Amino acid sequence: MSEAKKTATLTIDGASYELPIHSPTCGPDVLDIRKLYGQAGVFTYDPGFTSTASCESTITYIDGEEGVLTHRGYPIGDLAGKSHYLEVCYLLLYGTLPTATELETFETTITRHTMLHEQMATFFRGFRRDAHPMAIMVGVVGAMSAFYHDSTDINDPLQREIASHRLIAKMPTIAAMAYKYTIGQPFVSPRNDLDYASNFLRMCFAVPAEDYEVNPILSRAMDRIFTLHADHEQNASTSTVRLASSSGANPFACIAAGIACLWGPAHGGANQACLEMLKEIGSVDRIPEFIARAKDKSDPFRLMGFGHRVYKNMDPRATVMKQSADEVLELLGVDDNPLLQVASELERIALSDPYFKEKKLFPNVDFYSGIILEAMGFPTSMFTPIFAMSRTVGWISQWKEQLSDPGHKIGRPRQLYLGEDVRAYTDIENR
């Protein structure tokens, strides 16, 4: 941590305490309260930790007011527009953009790790056929620690590296197998001659009777979905991974914990909620009714996929995702899909209506990614698993960063206790 150049004075019951203030590369200054309890005997109260920096990080920076998202200093628009997912994975993991040779080596390594241990196919069959794919992914990723014993020692840098590569490489295979299992189709093995996104699409949509020819427009759109969801700073699932990691848990357990947290509808289910809203609207002629409801403060209805908790301006990821959505819809068409017709008209209205402009309720990345995945033929139950695949590299990068921090310690939030004070125990016959 940088040396504090400024301080703040906190006065409690007439006693004053000097608290260091640290200045980050970007963003607001940070008040250091680590010694506050020891010096003053008080805690701070911050539900949701929305005003608390839980760690130092050099990976991702977000400025929600200005609509900024950077990875290692590179704007997300540049990365999604000029790069591809595995190149961004390398950047997140190692801190720099790779040379051509480094990227080729990295891509080869990931490609050669895509297959799963054969016994894991049997493990899948322990789930009910109607199990949610996220339930399967939580279980299977957690079970990787039972199959890959040679990469669970977090104190061994080589094992950490192997585990990182395995998780990035095998997550598309696991997600595709979860999808195939829930629809009753045979598993499709990965192929080494396909790129990361194309391989995933083929594993999801090919069948033994007929192979799946991957359209480059769809592959590029899928790659952008992966890239735009790769990391998003200290959100709930990333914080969960870091908290699990702080106990010394193995990497597969930590990532499984992140997947479980992402499964929550308030976190990873936004694009699924968006599609469910489009289904509720049903047809283009009902849009004015729902627009009116969205503007009515007394109506609890809200438009999903518009605005963002973090971004108070245009979601910087949405601009690139809109381009992919336009390309996919032009390729596949919307005439035969009422949901996509509703989405297209809703987007047009939201971008032109003064109310949405004033409230900054722009379509966000979840709106466009939901449209793309729906157009590709994915059921909504697969939206969050695809999010989990994309975010795996971010979780791993944060996990590795935390383990390399000499000052990291096990997470232990405090509480504002409002329960009963000490009470005398009453024997059962006297109650």
Image: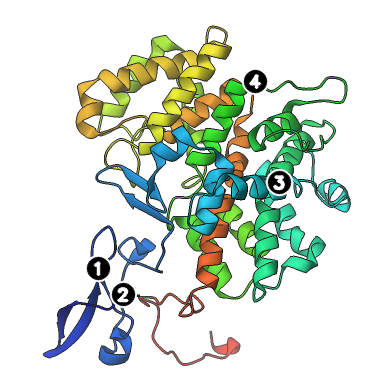
Give me the disc on residue 57. none
- Residue on which disc 4 sits: 215
Question: Of all residues shown, which one is farthest toward the top?
Answer: 335
- Per the image, label 2 sits on a secondary structure element best described as loop
Q: Position of residue 295 (x, y in %)?
A: 26, 27
Q: Position of residue 235 (x, y in %)?
A: 44, 55
On the rendered image, what quadrant is the N terminus found in? bottom left
Label 3 Cα neighbours within 10 Å, binned few <14 / some 14-19 / many ≥20: few
Badge 4 or badge 1: first in the primary sequence: 1
Residue at mark 1 to residue at mark 2: CA–CA distance: 8 Å
Q: Nearer the viewer, mark 3 or mark 4?
A: 3
Q: Earlier in the sequence, mark 1 or mark 2?
A: 2
Q: Residues within 10 Å of mark 1 (few under 14, many from 20)?
A: some
The earlier-in-sequence mark between 2 and 3 is: 2
Name the mark on residue 108.
3
Local packing at callout 2 (Cα closer than 10 Å; few below 14, some 14-19, many 20+) is few
Q: Is residue 183 left or right of residue 198?
A: right
Q: Nearer the viewer, mark 3 or mark 1?
A: 3
> Which numbered marker is on residue 23?
1
N-terminal of the pair, mark 4 or mark 2, is 2
Task: Give amino acid for label 2.
Answer: Ser
Q: CA distance from mark 3 to mark 1?
A: 40 Å
Q: Which numbered marker is on residue 2?
A: 2
Q: CA distance from mark 2 to mark 3?
A: 38 Å
Q: Nearer the viewer, residue 34 or 74?
A: 74
Label 1's element?
loop
Tell me if I can see residue 6 in this picture: yes
Label 3 vs 4, first from the N-terminus: 3
Q: Does residue 69 lie above or below 147 as drawn?
A: above
Question: What is the residue that sits farthest to the left in this orientation?
Answer: 14
Q: Is residue 138 above or below residue 1?
A: above
Label 3 is placed on what type of residue? Thr
